[in-house]
Image: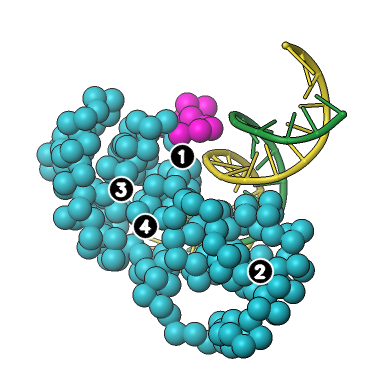
Chain colours: A cyan, B yellow, C green
DNA sequence: AAGTGTGACAACCGCGACGCG
DNA sequence: ACGCGTCGCGGTTGTCACACT
């Protein structure tokens, strides 16, 4: 796939469906190869970003709650612009989403939010959380949010989930270069041996 | 109504880290 | 040790919608 043929810009619904199906089939890995096998004219990076920030299951897309807002301000103050780390403390939120939210909503308001927080949380748990964030044990979410743990867990879950979705989506769209079933059936003819597709 | 400014969000880019042969 | 492919992260840009003049 040559660079000049790669699509950029907003993702189409068909592309989302195609990506979702192939991630369900192959897992969150080898994005460049996945993009090619899925027939997506996108870079692997672009596919990964789209999946991580928009298509991944269990993502929240609504507005941030007051508690989330406070936590972002608190963590930003403590960790700096370590958005990935901050995102692991906020279930269902992505680093990109938090980063954007910070830039557009909180950066200017941060001192105010911190002040409000100080007042309203003097007798609450926030104070103690603040000083112990780095030492908190990994929550279930945090564990799942780690890129490495996520891969393992999602691979396990997606084998079953993926099959259902694949069948349903394939019947509803006719735009794939390969349907996932066709792809799966054709897997025998692909050389998946070696490190490229090994799970370990 | 038309032009301009601004906010919000999606997506891209560059770079460093890591694993593997 | 080195090169290559891949991934993750943080900064930046592009685009769209809406408000304002």
Q: Nearer the viewer, mark 2 or mark 1?
A: 2
The residue that mark 4 highlights is: A58
x and y, in percent, of residue A101 in the image: 62, 54
Q: Real-space Cα distance between discs 4 and 1?
A: 24 Å
SS type, badge 4: loop
Q: Is residue A65 visible?
A: yes
Q: Real-space Cα distance between discs 4 and 2?
A: 23 Å
Ranked by sequence position, the earlier of labels 4 and 2 is 4
Q: Nearer the viewer, residue A101 or A164?
A: A101
The residue that mark 3 highlights is: A23
- Quadrant assignment for the C terminus of chain A: bottom left
Q: Real-space Cα distance between discs 2 and 1?
A: 33 Å
Which chain is mark 2 on?
A
Ranked by sequence position, the earlier of labels 2 and 3 is 3
Q: Is residue A194 visible?
A: no
Q: Nearer the viewer, mark 2 or mark 3?
A: 2
SS type, badge 3: helix
Q: Real-space Cα distance between discs 1 and 3?
A: 15 Å
Magenta residues span A1-11
The residue that mark 1 highlights is: A43
């Amino acid at each position: 796939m040559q660079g000049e043929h790669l699509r950029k810009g907003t993702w189409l619904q068909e592309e989302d469906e195609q990506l979702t199906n192939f991630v369900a089939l192959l897992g969150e890995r080898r994005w460049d190869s996945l993009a090619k096998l899925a027939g997506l004219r996108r870079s692997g990076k672009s596919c990964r970003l789209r999946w991580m920030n928009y298509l991944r299951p269990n993502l929240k897309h609504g507005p941030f709650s007051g508690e989330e807002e406070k936590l972002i301000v608190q963590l930003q103050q403590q960790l700096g612009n370590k958005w990935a780390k901050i995102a692991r403390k906020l279930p269902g939120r992505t680093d990109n989403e938090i980063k954007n939210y910070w830039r557009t909503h909180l950066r200017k308001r941060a001192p105010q939010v911190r002040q409000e927080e100080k007042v309203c949380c003097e007798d609450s748990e926030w104070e103690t959380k603040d000083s112990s964030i780095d030492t908190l044990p990994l929550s279930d979410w945090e564990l799942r949010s780690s890129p490495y743990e996520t891969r393992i867990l999602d691979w396990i879950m997606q084998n079953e989930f993926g099959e259902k979705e694949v069948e349903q989506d394939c019947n509803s769209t006719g735009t794939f270069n390969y349907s996932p079933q066709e792809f799966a059936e054709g897997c025998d003819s692909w050389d998946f041996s070696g490190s490229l597709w090994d799970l370990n």
